């Protein structure tokens, strides 16, 4: 009689749990199925991807402008070079998403986690975003004319604002961007364009503005402790009532700043 070899109980539970997790998070649709829905979509009858589970699916280079993605689960999905311009992406789940080179101009993103995502070269121009993008790569991103500042007239659940802690925004275009009250601790803004940007009351502790163009930027009441302004262009920048001046680097002796902040 052959002896059966049974797996230890702990290992059996691990396998069962792993299979259960995969089943739970299995995507509702494949790439080809999504493509078919997009091809049939019209302005009056958009592709219904509402609340769909699309975790980990390769959706790169697709045109979603006639799709409803509200509340969809896009964790780990690849939407690089895709077109999502003008969409309402409120309450979607986008942690770890790849949107490199994607078009997200004029989008609305509210109440969303986009932490640890690839957003390099993404076009976010003219968008309205209140989300958590901590730890994401936004190098060379276009954030011109974005409205990412906290709306102080609509804060029923406490301060809701965009979070950009430890985000890499080097070489990003933030011209005319509204980032009022944003939290940007340890953000990398090296060589970024911040011309005419609004950073009112923003949390900028240890942010790196090395060689950034902050011409006419508004830093009023911002928290600047340990921020680095080495080589930054600060012509016309407003530093009224900022906090943490004494611990900043490259600001005291910056010859481009208009205000005499330390006297």
Image (cartoon, rainbow, N blue to C red):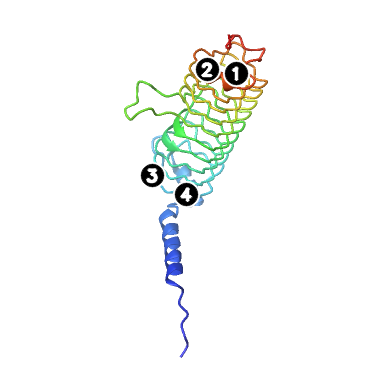
* Distance CA(mark 1)–CA(mark 4): 38 Å
Going from the N terminus, do you reach mark 2 or mark 4 first?
A: 4
Q: Secondary structure at mark 1?
A: loop
Of the residues tagged 3 and 2, which is closer to the observer?
2
Q: Counting residues from the N terminus, which is met first, the one under dot 1 or under dot 2? A: 1
Q: Which residue is mark 1?
A: 214
Quarter of the figure with residue 113 = top left
In the rendered view, would you say 147 is above or below 19?
above
x 38%, y 27%: residue: 159
Write down the residue under mark 3: 51
Count every numbered label the image shows and give the total: 4
Callout 1 touching callout 2 (CB < 8 Å): yes
Q: Position of residue 186 (x, y in %)?
A: 56, 31
Which residue occupies the foreground of this view, 259 or 236? 259
Residue 90, given in percent of the width and then of the height, sits at: 40, 35
Q: Secondary structure at mark 3?
A: loop
Alpha carbons under labels 1 and 2: distance apart: 10 Å
Q: CA distance from mark 3 to mark 1?
A: 40 Å
């Amino acid at each position: 009689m052959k002896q059966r070899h049974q797996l230890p109980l702990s290992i059996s539970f691990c396998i069962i749990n792993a299979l259960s997790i995969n089943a739970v998070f299995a995507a509702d649709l494949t790439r080809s199925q999504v493509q078919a829905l997009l091809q049939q979509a019209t302005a009056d009858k958009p592709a219904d991807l509402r609340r769909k589970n699309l975790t980990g699916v390769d959706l790169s280079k697709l045109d979603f402008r006639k799709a409803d993605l509200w509340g969809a689960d896009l964790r780990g999905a690849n939407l690089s070079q895709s077109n999502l311009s003008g969409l309402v992406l409120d309450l979607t789940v986008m942690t770890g998403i790849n949107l490199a080179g994607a078009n997200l101009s004029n989008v609305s993103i509210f109440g969303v986690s986009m932490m640890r995502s690839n957003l390099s070269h993404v076009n976010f121009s003219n968008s309205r975003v209140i989300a958590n993008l901590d730890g994401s790569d936004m190098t060379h991103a276009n954030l011109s004319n974005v409205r990412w500042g906290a709306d102080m007239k609509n804060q029923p659940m406490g301060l809701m604002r965009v979070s950009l802690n430890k985000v890499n925004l080097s070489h990003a275009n933030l011209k005319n961007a509204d980032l009022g009250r944003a939290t940007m601790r340890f953000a990398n803004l090296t060589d970024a364009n911040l011309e005419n940007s609004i950073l009112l009351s923003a949390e900028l502790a240890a942010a790196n503005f090395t060689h950034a163009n902050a011409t006419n930027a508004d830093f009023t009441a911002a928290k600047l402790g340990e921020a680095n302004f080495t080589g930054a262009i600060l012509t016309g920048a407003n530093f009224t009532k900022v906090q943490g001046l004494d611990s900043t680097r490259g600001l005291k002796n910056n010859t481009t700043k208009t205000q005499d902040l330390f006297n």
